[in-house]
Image (cartoon, rainbow, N blue to C red):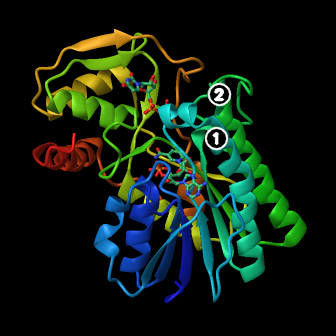
Amino acid sequence: MDTNTVSVVTGGAGFLGSHLCDRLLADGHSVIAMDNLITGNVANIEHLAGNRSFRFIHHDVTEYIFLPGRVDYVFHFASPASPIDYLELPIQTLKVGALGTHKALGLARAKKSRFLLASTSEVYGDPLVHPQPESYWGNVNPIGPRGVYDEAKRFAEAMTMAYHRAHGVDTKIVRIFNTYGPRMRPRDGRVVPAFITEALKGEPITVFGDGRQTRSFCYVSDLVEGIVRLSRSDLHEPVNIGNPREMSVLDFALKIAAACGSGSAVIHKPLPVDDPKVRQPDIAQARARLQWEPRVTLEEGLSRTIDYFRSLLAKGAI
Ligand code: NAD
Ligand code: UDP
């Protein structure tokens, strides 16, 4: 594997981006995190201040990216990612998926660097094929409230493949399935921080709909390992990275309550529009082409994540 590379991580002050920065630095590389902090937080990278291999640039990547010097990898992670974030920021979400991806690809082309797009299982929409292989084209409502995210990512994938085909940029696309871990924002509205915060505070756990919809949760270190492997591979087609262990949202609520030692009751609220009914990654490609599969059990990952939220609670941060 190559050493001493220079990576740009857009969205580097976010949940996943900051973990990717940590991993690249730990492997001996230099990292430039670029973020406008619209949903991210400098607290996620403050432990890297003073690290001479790390630099933070406050920049909106929908604007032209000027960066002197060598760049070997561009990891494009900038985008609101939680349903409540992208519903509050619909135009910014569309812009960063479209204009931001264009600018990040332009940087990779100018620097002759490799490019990796953080795409999503949302490109499959409310899937009619289950589990979802990369060959499935999806079932997306383009004009529904989630369309701003789903279509932005679908456009981003199309733009990435166009830069590969037309300009010969060495591009990769990872389709990330629900990933969780420390540094998720307590109030970002995603199910893991929502349920853990409610359970730790002894508040009712709010399950949307009847809770029979399913998700499959991957711990962040497993995801980052898959991304690093993909970035070093010669694959250009999208690759699913996620944990195939699927469960209903209601079972997940009960599991989190038990893991937190909480007596919280479950209450139900209306299901958001176009909330996918099932989701499970088919990871045959990642297994065969990257020799990757998840290692961290749900119990272990939840325990580490709950410890993180407990520490926030102790500091009065939630
Ligand atoms: P996050 O909100 O924590 O991180 C996103 C980061 O992008 C934030 O720091 C935000 O400030 C930054 N950003 C947004 N717009 C920007 C812009 N115009 N210019 C510069 N920075 C900008 O979310 P996350 O969970 O870390 O997601 C990171 C990426 O992974 C996103 O692209 C998301 O779509 C993708 N993804 C995440 C998951 C998951 O389960 N966490 C699943 C699928 C896809
Ligand atoms: N959900 C829930 N309660 C919450 C937040 C989410 O029941 O407080 C449900 C949501 O409706 C969805 C699942 O949990 O079915 C996962 O939601 P999340 O927002 O984490 O991500 P999604 O997979 O929908 O993008």
Q: Is residue 10 above or below residue 144?
A: below
List the residue tagged with mark 2.
129
Name the outermost residue toward the right.
166
249 sits to left or right of 314: right
Q: Which mark is residue 133?
A: 1
Counting from the top left corner in percent of width and height, residue 15 is at 41, 53
Counting from the top left corner in percent of width and height, residue 39 is at 46, 48
Crowd rating for badge 1 (residues with CA inside 10 Å; few <14, some 14–19, many 20+): some
Q: Is residue 40 above or below residue 247?
A: below
207 sits to left or right of 99: left
Crowd rating for badge 2 (residues with CA inside 10 Å; few <14, some 14–19, many 20+): some
- The amino acid on which the numbered mark 1 sits, given as a three-letter code, is Pro
Kind of element beneath mark 1: loop
State yes or no: discs 1 and 2 in contact (Cβ < 8 Å): yes
**174 or 15: nearer the viewer:** 15
Counting from the top left corner in percent of width and height, residue 272 is at 51, 18
Instruction: State the image quarter where residue 185 is shown.
Output: top left
Instruction: State the image quarter where residue 206 is shown.
Output: top left
- The amino acid on which the numbered mark 2 sits, given as a three-letter code, is Val
